[in-house]
Image (cartoon, rainbow, N blue to C red):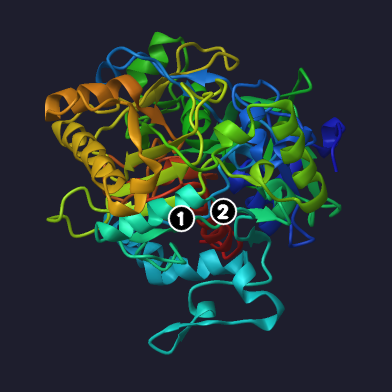
Amino acid sequence: MDGDMSDGANSFDYIVIGGGSAGCLMANRLSADPKTRVLLLEAGKPDTYPWIHIPVGYLYCIGNPRADWMYKTQPARGLNGRSLLYPRGKTLGGCSSINGMIYMRGQARDYDNWARLTGEKAWAWDSTLADFKAHEDHHKLDDGADPATGDNARFSDMHGHGGEWRIEKQRLRWDVLDSFADAAEETGIPRTDDFNTGDNAGVGYFDVNQRSGWRWNTSKAFLRPAKSRPNLVIWTEAQVEKLTFEIGADGQPRCTGALVHHKRQPVTVRAAKEVVLSAGAVNSPQILQLSGIGPAALLKQHGIDVVLDAPRVGENLQDHLQIRAVYKVKGTRTLNTLANSLVGKARIGLEYAFKRSGPMSMSPSQLGAFTRSDPSRPHANLQYHVQPLSLEAFGDDLHDFPAMTVSVCNLNPTSRGHVRIASSDFRQAPEISPNYLDTEEDRKVAAQSLRQVREIMAQPAMKSYEPEEFKPGIQYQTDEELARLAGDIASTIFHPVGTVKMGHKDDDTAVLDPHLRLKGVAGLRVVDASVMPEITSGNTNSPTIMIAEKAAGWIRAGQ
């Protein structure tokens, strides 16, 4: 249901701000109770733009105001003064409408660490596993299958079936990627056919959130089944200016709703029970700061009345920075050569039209690997995204020679950044400063990761392709050279988290309590990637959906 409400009808039990990865699930779960009225607010338009649904369409969504907030980072010292595009989904489905579709949970240690940092054992891996499984629909469990996975275990011990979140195999393979997997194995990285068992070390093809060769976003997964419910109202083109508050009898502010610009008309909406802020790691801290919850000095600087001095709102920003190495190859197909003629492009288009397979069904990265930057580390701390293509920069044309890209990122960066409003105007983008490569450790891991790429590419399995390092170039050898080079060529893989972090009730650095309620304000929770105290060891979309699953359970249980 989408539409204007009369003034008398602008009251709901729950208001969910942000129709992205967390917000779509939240709206579904809260509206499952027919006695509960739920409003979902999304600043962008419905996900009707065709390129959202064709997997390779991310190329046409990122950097396009139809589906992207069009943010940029502040120039960064660690990137040698560069500023980066910072894509964030602005449409129903949020980032799940424009992302790489990789299904990845991270590592068990990530969640056990959250449990330690919050004092809430429900965040531990053994508990979050149930939340992941609750909404999964894994292809390996189709038609009653349940393959054995060793040690008398079954696939269903780790995965769910029948939920909304579809997980499928990719519908393509490439010789050069198969050979890279062989080469990785020659360096000691084991094969894996499931990155999602709690330890993702190994090399293999990524599973993806697709259904029959189409992107499967959270809008299709969670909103479609729920949108006909009379108790769920969905407003698109509804951007929040600020939250509204009342001071309770105990002197504590209570969040009562929000001032929203719905199709450019200001309207105040009220929540009788809770406001759930699910606007993401950039927009959630921005909305809080615009509403008077944030560092007092920053708010006063922009003429905003302070509701709650919360110095850590917008701090603790973490992200995965990817370093792209490009190798020219010989004697094999790559997308560069397939797509460099009209005939080739027509072939690719026809294969997708008739079979929903081939390059148009590609996620941005097909083959993955998780490994350690040095043998002394107890866990995998590097993630590879390997692609049978190359280009100068995201959005540029493919190179006109056969090539592959081996991208590698530090899963556990120690650098921390921030998101801060730049104005009291809600329409103005906030300042985003991830502070990439700000620590000596991060620069060291960057240099180690580039050396490891070279080691894999030098293995016998790659020899027939005569790989030639095109970027960065073999002239860069020392740690200092490689770290500086990483600053020149590295780019975000769009995993911002942590800017409204949860923690122990007595942890002054935590903005939220362990159940994601905002400390010092009643009636307000934050439920999205911003709540992560530390970033997960892998892609962040499905962990964000898991967070929403867990939070929805707590809200329904009055916890």
Residue in the image at 40% along x and 72% along y: 126
How crowded is the residue under tag 1: few (<14 C-alpha within 10 Å), some, or many (20+)?
some
The answer, for residue 141, to whether it is visible in the render is yes
State if disc 1 and disc 2 touch (CB < 8 Å).
Answer: yes
**x, y percent for residue 473:** 27, 25
Q: Where is 494 relative to 518, above or below?
A: above
Query: Of the numbered discs in the image, which one, if any, rests on residue 48?
Result: none
Find residue 78 and report its image quarter.
top left
Q: Is residue 231 left or right of residue 368?
A: right
Amino acid type indicated by mark 1: Asp
Number of marks in picture: 2
Residue that label 2 marks: 173
How crowded is the residue under tag 2: few (<14 C-alpha within 10 Å), some, or many (20+)?
some
**x, y percent for residue 449:** 25, 40
State the SS at label 1: helix
**x, y percent for residue 112:** 31, 63
Find residue 257 and report its image quarter.
top right
Residue that label 1 marks: 178
Mark 2–mark 1 Cα distance, whole angstroms, equals 8 Å
Q: Where is 172 relative to 62, above or below?
A: below
**x, y percent for residue 89:** 61, 33
The foreground one among 518 and 17 is 17
